[in-house]
Amino acid sequence: MFDIVNIEKPGTLEAALEMLSRNPELKIIAGGTDVLIKMRNGALEEAELLSLRNIPGMDEIRILDNGTISIGAMATFAKIARSSIINENLPVLSEAAVSVGGPQIRNMATIGGNICNGAVSADSAATLLAYNAELKLLSRSGSRTVPVSEFYAGPGKVNLLPAEILTDILIPEAGYGRTSGCYIKYSGRKAMDIAMLGVSAVYKAEGGKFSDVRIALGVAAPVPIRCSEAEAYAIGKEISDETMKETGRYAVKSSRARDSWRASKAYREHLIEVLVFRALKEAVIRGGGVDIG
Amino acid sequence: MDKYEKISMVVNGKAYSLEVDIRESLLEVLRNRLHLTGVKQGCSVGECGACTVLIDGLPVNSCIYLAVWADGRKITTIEGVSKEGELSKVQQAFVDEGAVQCGFCTPGLVLTATALTESGRKYSDEEIKREISGHLCRCTGYSKIFNAVKRALDADC
């Protein structure tokens, strides 16, 4: 038995927002793979839940007229990994989705929940950062769109107001068009594990040089981060092993890794240097070497 | 204060309408109310896969799935896999390959393998390994399980 006092299961987003504004104690539950486990561990007691599962259409994945890809917050990782829209346009997100937990977890866990619980190890976070994704947050008083880079406030904390619901993750075409990329999840096991480090690299090239480089890390700081020093270094440089290796070294400067039982700070910093290089190199190989911009 | 809700679901082809406690997992309802004890309780936190059932054809950990969410859903447990006393091809493959030792992980693995065979897709060896990675077996070392799943999928072609 879970320590649940009450569960609301609205059938529309309007009803959900109404319930949320009436009772700020309501805890939003999506796939449940984090919230219910927190309850098992006693970290969440006497919960009043607001389940979004009965709201139709919240898991839709589509391309809008302006080229923006919209992923419903309730889309499961299994659905994202299978989606042809995602595989054709955001292959790095598909790669990240398939690295989450195991098959049963991916059939339940949602991308919205993965972002909103604020975990630094969220497999989708680094890739959404690398694609310059935006989050659409809806409340009764209206909606706002925030870049995912401004959403994380601290470990387990996100800038979601009490009366707000994340409805869609938006990736504008400028964020994914003509890019190549790669996600590397580094963990002790190939499945059912939490990342020791997650690296997402996305780039564009022009005339044999990097014209755009975006590197994002999970579990390298209190929140998922972009490596601005490394990106600034790489942009405009010739695409070569040396450039990419040096980019890895710069990425360590952007990080604030710490010691934890999963890995030491020194080990994580080594991983950052090596895996940023590997992710970028793999991205370049997938991009056909040069000139994909 | 106990709170109950009425749900309707189809389990192994049979329609049920029952009052469930909002605090209950689907695992608890299947085992304690419907006495489908082939659904095993292992870790209770979605890591071991022993509680796996198919919900609308997809493998899900029933220990972290609220019973109230099952309203309107179609559930398959291991009790619903064999037909008229005949083992399914997945079950037969597990027998043929000797993929069962203590048996605790077997119901979940058979259900995941059943979902794979019913998907109509082909799977590479790496994909099979990935698809069964949400199940822990502490007896066999997985080789025989992998062989059984592969055999069941090959039998499909």
Image (cartoon, helix red, strand yellow):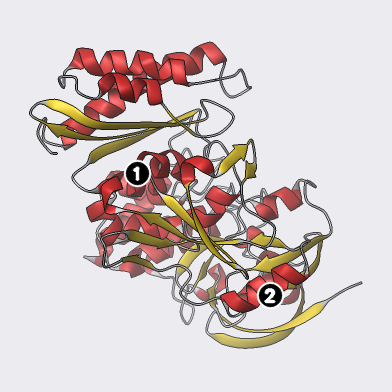
Q: Identify the residue at the far front of this view.
A: A141
**Residue A223 lies in quadrant:** top right
Measured in 3D between alpha carbons, the distance from the residue under mark 1 to the one under mark 2, in whole angstroms, is 32 Å
Q: Amino acid at mark 2?
A: Glu
Frontmost residue, A204 versus B8: A204
Q: Position of residue A249 (x, y in %)?
A: 36, 13
Q: Which residue is mark 1?
A: A131
- Please give the count of numbered marks on the rendered protein: 2
Q: Amino acid at mark 1?
A: Tyr
Say few, some or many: other residues with alpha carbon within 10 Å of mark 2 (under 14 / 14 to 19 / 20 or more). Answer: some
Task: Tell me: residue A129, above or below residue B135.
Answer: above
The residue shown at (70%, 58%) is A162
The residue shown at (64%, 58%) is B64
- Is A189 situated left or right of B148 in this image? right
Q: Which mark is on residue A225? A: none
Residue A47 seen in render: yes
Task: Tell me: residue A149, above or below residue B5.
Answer: above
Quadrant of image for the C terminus of chain B: bottom left
The residue shown at (48%, 70%) is A58
Frontmost residue, A273 versus A32: A273
- Is B18 situated left or right of B48 in this image? right
Q: Identify the residue at the far right of this view.
A: B1
Compare marks 1 and 2 and give the one earlier in the sequence: 2
The residue shown at (70%, 77%) is B34
Quadrant of image for the N terminus of chain B: bottom right
Task: Tell me: residue B11, above or below residue B102.
Answer: below
Q: Which mark is on residue A18? A: 2
Q: Are marks 1 and 2 on the same chain?
A: yes
Give SS at disc 1. loop
Residue B113 seen in render: no
